[in-house]
Amino acid sequence: MSEPLGAPPQQQSVGELLSDVTRDLSTLLRQEIELAKAETRQSAKQAAKGGSMFAGAAVAGHMVLLFLSIALWWALGDLMDSLAWSAVVVAVLWAIVAAVLAARGRAESKRVAGLPRTTDTVKKIPNALQGHEEKNT
């Protein structure tokens, strides 16, 4: 039915308004939770990549200790044998590998951004609830 020209628009009851606000707030919170989940998954993948680089650095560091120990053992046992010095060279190579992996792992860890979009949109909720969306720009 159409209203006669000049008649005031039909107003919603307080209960209907409250129902609308509750529904909209529920929708907003569900969307924020979904955004947080998506950003968390992305951050977790980046953190896992950085963690795997640190694991590689740990293995390489273990090899440094192993070869340095072997080199010291051989050096003390044979004093002038060249096999001991070759073990030192191998240990130095492992030290270089460990340093490269540690640097890569550190760089990957710094790329983890957290939840920037979720944080930004959650900050806008109070203004939206008060009807001041223009303050969110």
Image: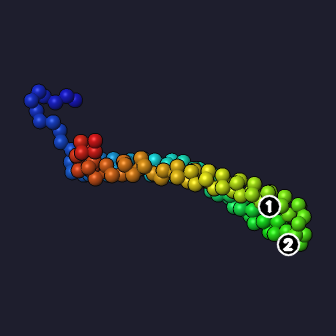
Residue named by callout 1: 88
Residue 61 located left or right of residue 88: left
The answer to whether 75 is drawn above or below residue 109 in the figure is: below
Amino acid identity at mark 2? Leu
Residue 85 located left or right of residue 118: right
Dividing the image into 4 quarters, which one contains the C terminus? top left
Q: Which quadrant would residue 71 be assigned to in this image?
A: bottom right
127 and 19: which is toward the camera: 127
Whether residue 66 is visible: no
**Residue extending furthest toward the bottom:** 76
Q: Earlier in the sequence, mark 1 or mark 2?
A: 2
3 and 76: which is toward the camera: 76
Query: Decide: marks 1, 2 in contact (CB < 8 A)?
Result: no
Residue named by callout 2: 76
Within 10 Å of the Cα at label 2, are there few (<14), some (14-19), or many (20+) other Cα atoms?
few
Dividing the image into 4 quarters, which one contains the N terminus? top left
Q: Which quadrant would residue 10 be assigned to in this image?
A: top left
Within 10 Å of the Cα at label 1, are there few (<14), some (14-19), or many (20+) other Cα atoms?
many
73 and 127: which is toward the camera: 73
Determine the residue positioned at 23% across, 50% down: 130
Determine the residue positioned at 13% across, 28% down: 4
